[in-house]
Image (cartoon, grey):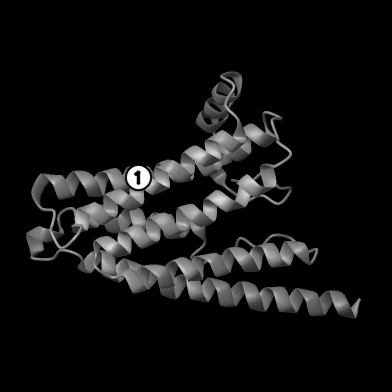
């Protein structure tokens, strides 16, 4: 969702398929804001699917239903990332930037992060861990925007930036499909959430240190 001058470096942005798809969307009249909102809807689907896969209200979901929900959650998570790519391409490459684009550039991302991460944690019966991961994700975004507001380049550094978090979520969902064969259920998801939390905290600390260092270097000039 990169409609600002500082855009997350993505190799997929330079692929032929992405250029063709964004071009078709632009010609069909799709707006960047609409794509952003659709991506947020996919995040809602992903979070709900992950939650339902773990069982809601104490009733466990098992068998084919659980598998389908995990696969749906993984697919919707990747769909959310695809929307994040395409909304910026339609806005910039297709020249369809909107006056309120900056709001839709950031707001749906924060909601989407919370929906997916908390939904995954609720399915594993770990709501507190989910909210902790979501809060850490918010902090990384805040530090990036704080740097931009201070006149510095946007910092998209990891090791657990948004694409990495979503890759970890997707991997956890897919690996959880065969987990019952080993007598496991939510162990893979719990491990993934702890890894995401640790990596996101490291990311926030790294961005904070880089921000302070850059401000001090600018002050010496």
Residue at 12% over, 58% down: 60
User: What residue would you read off at disc 1?
Assistant: 45
Q: Which image quadrant for residue 56?
A: bottom left
Q: In the shown orientation, is residue 145 left or right of residue 175?
A: right
Q: Where does the image place residue 8, in percent across and percent down from the top left?
A: 62, 51
Q: Where does the image place residue 72, in percent across and percent down from the top left?
A: 28, 43
Q: Secondary structure at mark 1?
A: helix
Q: Where does the image place residue 113, in percent across and percent down from the top left?
A: 46, 57
Q: Nearer the viewer, residue 9 or 99?
A: 99
Q: 42 above or below 21?
A: below
Q: Where does the image place residue 164, in percent across and percent down from the top left?
A: 46, 59
Callout 1: 10 Å neighbours few (<14), some, many (20+)? many
Instruction: Say whether residue 217 is visible.
Output: yes
Q: Nearer the viewer, residue 160 or 108?
A: 108
Residue at 13% over, 66% down: 184
Q: 21 above or below 146?
A: above
Q: Which image quadrant for residue 181?
A: bottom left
Q: In the shown orientation, is residue 202 left or right of residue 215?
A: left
Quadrant location of the N terminus in the rendered image = top right
Instruction: Say whether residue 196 is visible.
Output: no
Residue furthest front as drawn: 57
Residue at 29% over, 63% down: 122
Q: How many marks?
A: 1
Q: In the shown orientation, is residue 105 left or right of residue 51?
A: right
Residue furthest top as drawn: 27
């Amino acid at each position: 969702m990169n409609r600002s001058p500082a855009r997350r470096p993505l190799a997929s942005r330079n692929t032929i398929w992405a250029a063709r798809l964004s071009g078709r969307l632009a010609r069909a009249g799709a707006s960047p804001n609409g794509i952003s909102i659709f991506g947020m809807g996919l995040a809602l689907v992903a979070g709900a699917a992950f939650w339902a896969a773990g069982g809601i209200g104490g009733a466990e979901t098992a068998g084919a239903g659980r598998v389908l929900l995990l696969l749906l959650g993984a697919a919707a998570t990747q769909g959310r990332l695809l929307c994040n790519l395409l909304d910026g391409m339609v806005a910039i490459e297709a020249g369809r930037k909107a006056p309120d684009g900056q709001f839709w550039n950031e707001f749906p991302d924060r909601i989407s992060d919370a929906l997916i991460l908390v939904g995954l944690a609720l399915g594993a019966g770990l709501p507190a861990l989910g909210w902790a991961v979501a809060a850490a994700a918010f902090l990384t975004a805040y530090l990036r925007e704080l740097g931009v507001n201070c006149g510095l380049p946007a910092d998209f550094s990891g090791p657990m930036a948004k694409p990495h978090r979503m890759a970890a979520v997707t991997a956890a969902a897919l690996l959880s499909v065969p987990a019952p064969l080993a007598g496991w259920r939510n162990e893979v998801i719990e491990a993934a959430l702890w890894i995401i939390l640790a990596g996101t905290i490291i990311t926030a600390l790294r961005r904070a240190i880089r921000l302070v260092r850059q401000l001090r270097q600018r002050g010496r000039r």
